[in-house]
Amino acid sequence: MKRTVFSIISSLILAATLTACGSGVKLNDVPVEDRTGQTQPSGDASGTSGRGVQTVQVEGADASLAGPANVTKIIYFDFDSYVVKPEFQGAIEAHAKYLTANKGRKMAIEGHTDERGGREYNLALGQKRAEAVRRALGLLGVSDAQVEAVSFGKEKPAVPGSDEEAMAKNRRAELNYR
Amino acid sequence: MSIAPPFRPLRRRTLVSLLAAGALPAVPAFAQFRVEVSGVGLTQLPIAVAAFRGDVQAPQKIGAIVRADLERSGMFRSIDTAGVTADENTRPDLSAWRQKGADSMVTGSVTPLADGRYDVRLRLWDIVRGQDMGGQSYTVGAADLRLSAHRISDFVYEKLTGEKGIFSTRIAYVTKAAQKYNLWVADSDGEGAQSALTSPEPIISPAWSPNGSQLAYVSFESRKPVIYAHDVASGKRRLLANFRGSNSAPAWSPDGKQLVATLSRDGGSQLYAIGLNGGEPKRLTQSSSIDTEPAFSPDGRYIYFVSDRGGAPQIYRMSPGGGNAERVTFTGSYNISPAVSPDGRWLAYVSRVGGAFKLHVMELASGTVTPITDTSADESPSFAPNSRLIVYATQQQGREALMTTTLDGKIKAKLSGASGDIREPDWGPFQR
């Protein structure tokens, strides 16, 4: 029941999101205005520059639904490593079992990094972690259609701080059922 | 005087402090125009910018904005005007200003009109030759007073250096405050910011379209990275890339007809060309490594990008259609975030040096590399459209901040403006 409610909410949010971005304007057709012309050296220009910016507010999507009980949904990685450690094999097997038994369920694998380095490069590194988990699940028979590997890079640390303890908690992949 | 606490040893610090102090006489009202000069160039033109007549009553202090613009460019040194107000009709006392060391002087006025707008005028004087170098006048609404000040700076800069000024261009950046992310469009000094997008989820990698009307960026609002194109004037936006996996690092081609971005739709992070009107993305790289952070050279001949195909992230370049890549960086084991200057001469990028991430500039013709900062968490360099300044993100006193620097690293200024952590700058093109 809870899941249904969540699904409805998620659908609504998704629909809202799609509506919000469903502008049919061809970008090539957007007229290029001379928005700076009003400050030409002359006395009769109008008073606004046309440099106004329209604010758009968006809502976030909701995250995780239930999966297998009592199984961790966070896989931690070593520094500069993109290999699923043996200690998480049990959790991977439990999720694989759940997903193969529930073909209708889907999961997002969200890769994360610690804070060191560039945002985009870290996004690619987080993707490597997510895909390592996806491959581990795939080896156990989970269909690629059920899981999507995505990355947050260093944008969503689990814990604040720059010490090694904090960074170790941030190098992770989170498994979120949808 | 609120030169903010010096954040690094200043060369010839006393002189700089005096100059900056003279440049910014009225502390509280002008605090937002602080330029933290952290070095002194050798060939700066000494210029006196008087307070404009009417500045005291006007909502924006034109003289102070112009003075800060010119200082930030690195090409000018401000001469203390000691609170002198001089309008465009006042002939400066040449011998007095010569004695103070000024080569040129800006005078002007800002006058409210009956309809609520303002008449802004300036005159530029060659103090050495005693010549009137010309003037301008602008009639603007209150909201565009800052823009008129930046246009005055552009006029002065071009008259005295022979090159186009960039003061009236715009910068996009992202702030994070209280778990809220905001994409801003601001003046080139970071002020006058207008919000283009607010989101509870991260926003990264804004990229101006070549005509300056749209921003492409990566938004995580749907709990994964997807790329939007966003018309900033209307707020209309649409999904450019929402493929399976992650979608990131958008880069416009110089003709504005397509973007190159990093997609993981086929596994791994690879570069793809994306048309503006949809259609199947064209895969440009075929590696089992990370290929990301594409950046076009302004002539469209190359895409620079980051790849770890050699075991560690380095910068490579290839033709825009894909194919063989040529390695560009050879020093260091972590080189990322390439940006090519609009004149095609320089490559700015971030290199890890002993655990610190530092902005470097490479002269492309010679391959000569120069580190140009003393900070240790530099990110996301972006060139001004005249190739004379770079804006980049860094950390100061534990906060994320934006800085501009000259290409030799000698003149740096911290952009103030929005509160919270400021990051991900992208310098927009010349407009008009």
Image (cartoon, coloured by chain):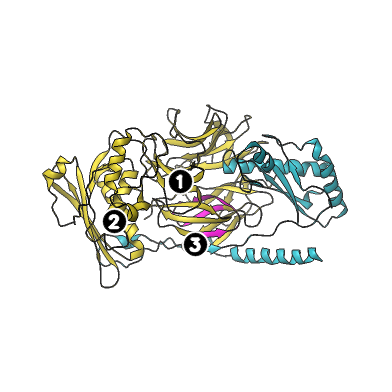
Chain colours: A cyan, B yellow
| Residue B47: % across, % down | 23, 44
Left or right of B297? Residue B17 is: left
The three-letter code of the residue at mark 3 reads Asp
Q: Are marks 3 and 2 in contact (CB under 8 Å)?
A: no
Left or right of B366? Residue B21 is: left
Q: Secondary structure at mark 3?
A: helix
> Label 2: few (<14), some or many (≥20) within 10 Å?
many
Question: Pointer 3 indicates a residue of which chain?
Answer: A
Which one is nearer the viewer's eye here, B327 or B230? B230
Question: Pointer 2 indicates a residue of which chain?
Answer: B
What residue is drawn where x is 25% and y is 69%? B113
Specify start and end residues of the magenta stretch as a single range.
Answer: B196-217
- Vertically, is B5 above or below B190? above
| Residue B136: % across, % down | 23, 57
Quarter of the image for residue B130 reads top left
Which one is nearer the viewer's eye here, B325 or A61? A61
- Vertically, is B391 above or below B29? above
The three-letter code of the residue at mark 1 reads Leu
**Residue at the disc numbered 1:** B402
Eye-nearest disc, 3 or 2: 2
Report the disc number at residue B109: none
**Residue at the disc numbered 2:** B62
| Residue B259: % across, % down | 55, 49
| Residue A142: % across, % down | 83, 47
Label 1 and label 3: CA atoms lie apart by: 34 Å
Which one is nearer the viewer's eye here, A104 or B48? B48
What residue is drawn where x is 57% and y is 38%? A117
Report the disc number at residue A29: 3
